[in-house]
Amino acid sequence: MIDFRYHLVSIVAIFLALSVGIVLGTSFLEDPAIKATEIFANQLRVSNEEYRDQLEAVQKREAANDAFVTDAAPRLVQNALATENVVIVEAPGVTNAVREGVQDLLVKAGATVTGRVVLDESYIDAAQAPLIEKLADEAKPADMTFPADATPHRKVATALADAIVTDDPAQIGKENPVAAGVLDAFEAGGLLTVTGAPAKRAALAVLIAPAEPYTGEGAAQQANAIVSMALGLDETGRGVVMAGAPSSATTGGAVAALRDDAAAAEKVSTVDNADKPMGRVVVVYALREQLSGATGQYGIGPGASGVEPSASPAPTATSGG
């Protein structure tokens, strides 16, 4: 009979053979494996260096382009909005850099910025809809009638627009006595804050979109609240442009929401690269185009029809002062 010692010797022999095989296999494969890994790592390093160099080159070209447009901007927009009055409306989440850049170029284009209306976070808060509607119903002029299907945001936009913009050249620069208490009521209700004198009505408005897209379940409703404001301003004034950064034209962004609304896109112009000098120049051109009765979607993001109006209208005649 085969005894236990035979089994033990067999098992030891098997493990010894495996050990010898592993050692021999590793010795034979060690150099090729290491060399192949080194070659691959070196290729990755070279590729990364090339991509880094390309990125730096693109960044340098972009910085040079921005510097050139910044220097040329005063000439590019000179008298484009001569004697026009423009009001700025800011959605919650607007960056100072975008707003200040747009406002500065409006002034360089000859416009008078009557003031700024900064919407509070409560304006886009779905939970605040009953309060928003109550404020609109109480603050609106007595002779103003809202459509039966008007949303709370559309009611606020209509009442606010009546107080800060007009399409009547004779009324530009003058307060609307009928809507005199609207801004005060909305400010007291925590819906917005006011800087300057937006009650001295303007013909044109720039609505600055939030820096970041809305996310979550209420994203569409929040973006549409900003679109409602744009439509209210458009219906009462002579033109409005919604301006934002490229992110505003992506899913959840206010610019994207407006462009996706066919009826709104036929009335309100958009610029999705207003964070850059070129985009701010286009904001001026788009406002001027609005005065001519035309509308366009401009920038570099989804839904843009071009970088700028295809044929920039000539400077307009004086419509206000």
Image: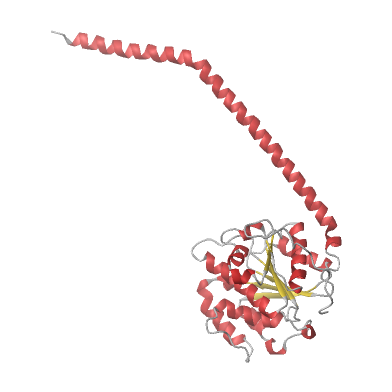
**Residue 316 in view (yes/no):** yes
The picture places residue 166, in percent across and down from the top left corner, at: 73, 81
Which residue lies most toward the front here? Answer: 311
Which residue lies most toward the left here? Answer: 1
Horizontal arrangement in the rendering, residue 160 relative to residue 313 (left or right): left
Horizontal arrangement in the rendering, residue 73 relative to residue 89 (left or right): right
Q: Quadrant of residue 263?
A: bottom right
Q: Quadrant of residue 292?
A: bottom right
**279 up-or-down from 229: above or below:** above
Q: Quadrant of residue 296?
A: bottom right
Quarter of the image that includes the C terminus: bottom right
Q: Nearer the viewer, residue 122 or 82?
A: 82
Q: How is the image coloured?
A: secondary structure
Which residue lies most toward the bottom here? Answer: 142
Quarter of the image that includes the N terminus: top left
Q: Nearer the viewer, residue 241 or 37?
A: 241
Horizontal arrangement in the rendering, residue 125 relative to residue 92 (left or right): left
Horizontal arrangement in the rendering, residue 24 relative to residue 285 (left or right): left
**6 up-or-down from 35: above or below:** above
The picture places residue 110, in percent across and down from the top left corner, at: 84, 70
Residue at point 80%, 48% (across, down): 64
The picture places residue 314, in percent across and down from the top left corner, at: 83, 68
Q: How many marks?
A: 0
The picture places residue 262, in percent across and down from the top left corner, at: 59, 69
Residue at point 63%, 81% (across, down): 158
Residue at point 83%, 66% (across, down): 108
Q: Nearer the viewer, residue 240 or 126?
A: 240
**Residue 88 in view (yes/no):** no
